[in-house]
Amino acid sequence: MSAKVKEIIFSSIVDMRNEIELEGIIEDYLNDKLTEGEKNAFEELRRNDPSVDHRVVTHKTFVESLASYANTLELKNKMDAAHAMIDVDQLSRKLGPHPSIIVNIWRKNRAAIAVAASFILLTTVMIYSIQLTTQQTTGYEKMSVELNRLKSSTNSLIRNVKSNQHHSTAPVKPVKFGGTGFAISSNGYILTSYHVIEKSDTVYVQNNKGEQYKVEITYKDPVNDIAILKIIDKKFSLSALPYSLKRSAVGMGESVYTLGYPKEDIVFGKGYLSSQSGFNGDTLAYQVAIDVNPGNSGGPLLDNSGNIIGIINAKESHTDGATFAVKAKYLQDALSSIPQDSVVGKISSKKIQKHRLEPSKQVSKIQEYVFMVKGL
Amino acid sequence: MSNKLSSSVPTDREVVLGILNNSEEALNKLYTGYFPMVLQFILNNNGNEDDAKDVYQEGIIVLYNKIKGGDFELSSKLKTYIYSVCRRIWLKKLTQQRKKTNNIADFEDVLVVDEDVEHHEEKDRQFDKMQSALLLLGEPCKTIIQDFYINNLSMQDICEKFGYTNTDNAKTQKYKCLQRLKKLFFQV
């Protein structure tokens, strides 16, 4: 081994020695183990030699991160010990997601579901209120008294007997409808609303004295809601009709009245003509402001002079005082259907009366010509 | 919210003082007190029990370092702080795993703790680096370094423990070990 090599090895050993010594001093310095004099001398060296200063800083940082590593490790070990004391499985069962998919969907989408639900609720409420409003405008009640809601008529009874002999013993309740009608001739032709007798085959009329007459239906017009009845009793006869048919238009606001049988006794109702058109703009009818009740259907609508201007047939169900009456001019078809030779003292549409009688006098006279119509 | 947690939790003051005094009892109380809350959060957000343990321990370390660092002010409840930190850590992990992170099911109020969590992530990287460096260092260097720098044994103790003939030899050995460790640490 040459002297040169020996020298290099020796100097590197010396360097390392110095390095070790330096590190020892740095560590002592950082741990505050140097004496006052040594500390001052070392700080002097730090200031003068940047490489020494650099070594102090890097060493400090490194030892600190080593210490932080050690602390964290210790903390982790302590936490693992603490963790071992917890019954994680039991907690998981209690706190984990519900096994049911539906519950999870509910939990995760609570907000969305709430929004959807309120939307549906809102929509339902809106649709419902719209329907309510619509019902108000479309509600339309026929004014016949439906005394019994069983819709089986004599017709269906007959059919039952034919098809099911063994069922013929079953008791059949007759359907009773009630309405009003008025005489259109002195020999027993009576005009009423079609819907009053619509479901009946056997119809009776009763006058204000309580006398009943059996009638036959001679004319039916469902479109205009008109029917004509004829009292079968040949001996029946009335004195000349105290009223005539007023086919010309009646002015709005004109006082009108009606007579009808909403109950067993004849009832007078007074009001005024409130519109030239009927339900939903129906030009066949007038709208009148008279409170009517089921049973008024078919009753005559008269003006103050005692002329018949219409026939009561319906009212708006949710609006009080909106009653509809078929206009007198549409009764013409019905009247012309009556065979001329069988009519005696037919109602006149030409001689329009003008204040012949006081309204109260008119009523007492007219009521004899107004009948209760009873369908069986 | 469902499933109210009923486990006994120490008061916030108790925890802070306990940590500053290195009280193991305080740590245990803290740990067991708030674990169910974090477990519930993780389980209901695409995680399992192991995820909960990892995230919770990281959260406690964040709190621990913050208290130890002296810049912890009781401006919020500890519970809220721990929850927020763990939540942040877990959401980051979920994003890294490319899992769905919308529709987070929350169980507590949430604070903004991004800064603390980022600071922690830096420290966590250092921890991992140190751990693998020490692993690569091997024995007896690892033990010598740990004894001297962590367990604060004197050179004399180490000399006797490892049977060196004199302290200078021990010092040389320790020096070489530290140099290697530094090299490994900055390489990894």
Image: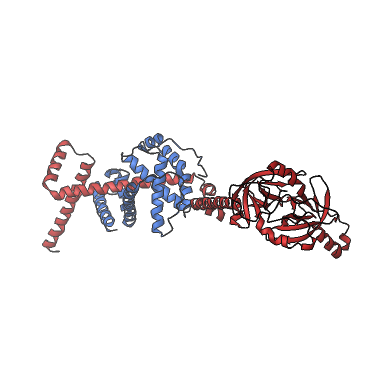
Chain colours: A red, B blue
Residue A16 shows in the view = yes
Q: Position of residue A9 (x, y in %)?
A: 16, 59
**B40 or A217: nearer the viewer:** A217
Q: Position of residue A276 (x, y in %)?
A: 59, 53
Q: Residue furthest bottom?
A: A163
**B178 or A255: nearer the viewer:** A255
Q: Position of residue A187 (x, y in %)?
A: 80, 55
Image side of residue A260 versus residue A95, left or right = right
The quarter in which the N terminus of chain A is drawn is bottom left
Residue A199 shows in the view = no
Image side of residue B124 versus residue B2, left or right = left
**A78 or A264: nearer the viewer:** A264
Image side of residue A321 versus residue B52, left or right = right
Image side of residue A109 versus residue A53, left or right = right
The quarter in which the C terminus of chain A is drawn is bottom right
Q: Is residue A132 above or below residue B75?
A: below
Q: Position of residue A211 (x, y in %)?
A: 83, 47
Query: Going 50% across and 40% down the picture, which residue do you hit?
Result: B7
